[in-house]
Amino acid sequence: MYLVLGILYESLVHPVTILSTLPSAGVGALLALLGTGTEFSIIAVIGVILLIGIVKKNAIMMIDFALQLEREQQLEPRDAIHRASLLRLRPILMTTVAALFGALPLAIGTGDGAEMRRPLGIAIVGGLILSQLLTLYTTPVIYVYFDRFSSWSRRKLGGRLGRPELGVGAALVLLCLLAGCAVGPDYKRPQAGTPPMFIARTNTLPDVPETPTLIPATLLERRPDIAAAERRTAAANAQIGVARAAYFPDLSLTGTGGYESNEFSSLFSVPNRFWSLGPNLAQTIFDAGAIHAQVKQNIAAYDFNVATYRETVLTAFQDVEDNLATLKLLAEESQAEVNAAKAAELTLEITQNQYQAGTVDYLNVVVAQQTALTAERAVRDLANRRLTASVGLLKALGGGWRTSDLVH
């Protein structure tokens, strides 16, 4: 970045003035993140990188105009940077405020993905506020002092080095060397050994559980979907009876009894005792077919639940049958692959013996090794598929395939 600015301005000093605005932006972003308790993530780093271009723009606008005034109107550097700061204050504030309000929704926004965008907005807002407050004052000061330092270097070092610009360059190089950090201790790469579990090779395969040829259909009663469908069907059948009960009259018998008196001393005497008993009979005479429609609705709901129950049971039978057929076919295929793997191992052993005897070259051994490895991978792949089918059968049955697993 310094080299690019140096080439553009044809100077070794002005790029340093421009880059001096960057630390305030970084400090402002860090303070904003610390103040809000936000983690300094990669998104926040992207925000700091965006700040570099925005903050550099303020210094570039002032320095460009100051240099133009020095060339065209032969103003002193102090007067030129003072006038440039006054004339460029409005565009600097306009662009900074526009960028600030553009990043503010990212900092305070909510919703999906807001936690990822918030560090970006907080870093930009904090960096812009602090850099705007500081660089408007520090950039002219640094510009003037660097101009004085450039004049001093021309007087002191320019004659010795032959060119005045080299004096400034030598001073900057000296400052960089003095500010550089010391070389760290010799780094030794730690030993990272491979875990034994990735080195040792096992030839044993997990055992595939043996499945019977015939499985009782009563095992499907454990499936949650079948049990739920059966209960929904029973509940729909009960609702039909509830709806049909509305055809019959509602008979109720009400009785009351107790004691009543104006004086407490004679409250529980026989003359003060009273009682009443009466029946109540209610029957709907005309409902415009509402009860009949309710019964038909419940019958239709019952038929729907019966069809759903039948579909659930048939789907369960299909799942079990598919997994049983898959296990049977994979068992046959696995046996054939095991025989092929044994033949490939025998071929590899014979080829290795021939190579040691000098009758074949090593290319034949490599081909035999590749064939044996391919066969072994096929055996392990089939074992994995058989285990997956066994798990699928357990899932389809709702548990194991022994009748002793049923809960009565």
Image (cartoon, helix red, strand yellow):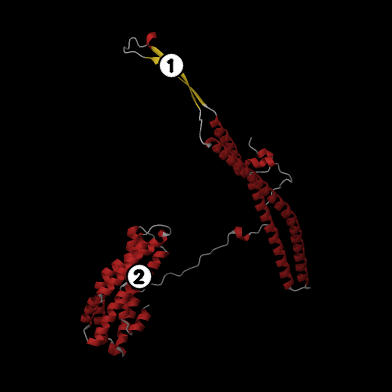
What x and y, as percent, mark residue 83? 22, 79
What secondary structure is found at the residue carrying circle 2?
Answer: helix
* Residue in the foreground of this view, choosing between 174 and 108: 108
| Vertical comparison of 377 with 90: above or below | above
Quadrant of the image containing the C terminus: top right
Residue type for callout 2: Leu
From the image, tell me which residue sits under label 1. Answer: 276
Residue type for callout 1: Ser
Q: CA distance from mark 1 to mark 2?
A: 92 Å
What x and y, as percent, mark residue 96? 30, 70
**Quick check: 54 left or right of 350?**
left
* Residue in the foreground of this view, choosing between 148 and 265: 265
Dot 2 surroundings within 10 Å: few (below 14), some, or many (20 or more)? many
| Vertical comparison of 200 with 393: above or below | below
What x and y, as percent, mark residue 320? 68, 48
Q: Find residue 51 and name its label.
A: 2
Dot 1 surroundings within 10 Å: few (below 14), some, or many (20 or more)? few
Quarter of image, res 264: top left
